[in-house]
Image (cartoon, helix red, strand yellow):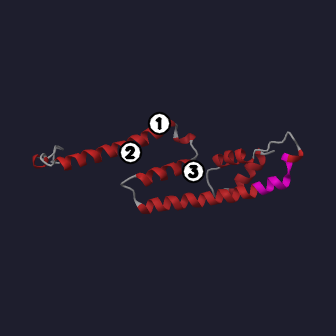
Amino acid sequence: MDDVGNIKSSLNQDFKGLLNLYEKENNDHQYLSMLVDHALELPLHWRMPRLEARWFIAEYEKSKDKNPIILDLAILDYNKVQSIHQEDLRYVSTWWKELGLGKRFSFARDRLMENFLWTVGMVIAPEDGKKVEYFLKWSMR
């Protein structure tokens, strides 16, 4: 490209190079178009941050311009948070089974997973495990 943004006349005969340039430009637009489409589906503040992070990790893996260090850090962070949530769920599941309200009372809400996902959506920071526990116990009553 010259200073004005036009293709240099010496490159006009290089059809393969021009085709590659066109395809790269088109691929960049497809990736950007996909990001815009995703953003327009649902506002970001309505989404669960960690599920959104998982979606971006999957899409970033497909990108040709990805930074492998950033990708590895994102995957590591996602897996760390996932293990924290699994630990919280394991604890609360044991508590719920020991309490036995779902079996003793037919009218009790026996919906642990639904309440857990609601609670994880409310308490965004994974370090707030006690908040997750308190909200979940409150919502299960």
Q: CA distance from mark 1 to mark 2?
A: 14 Å
Q: Earlier in the sequence, mark 2 or mark 3?
A: 2
Three-letter code, disc 2: Tyr
- Give the number of the disc on residue 40: 1
- Whole-percent x, y for residue 21 in the image: 24, 48
Q: Label 3 is placed on what type of residue?
A: Arg
Three-letter residue code for mark 1? Leu
Circles 3, 1 touching at the beta carbon (< 8 Å): no
Q: Residue at 84% across / 46% down in the picture?
A: 102
Depth check: give the residue in front, 16 or 56. 16
- Residue 82's image quarter? bottom right
Whether the magenta-drawn stretch holds residue 104 is answered as no
Magenta span: chief secondary structure:
helix
Q: Which stretch did the figure color magenta?
A: 93-102
**Which residue is denoted by mark 2 in the rendering?**
31
Q: Residue at x 42, y 42 (%)?
A: 34
Horizontally, is 79 left or right of 119 in the view?
Answer: left
Query: In this view of the protein, which residue sits in the foreground, 83 or 131?
Result: 83
Question: Helix, strand, or loop for circle 3?
Answer: helix
Q: Looking at this rendering, what residue extends furthest in the right direction?
A: 104
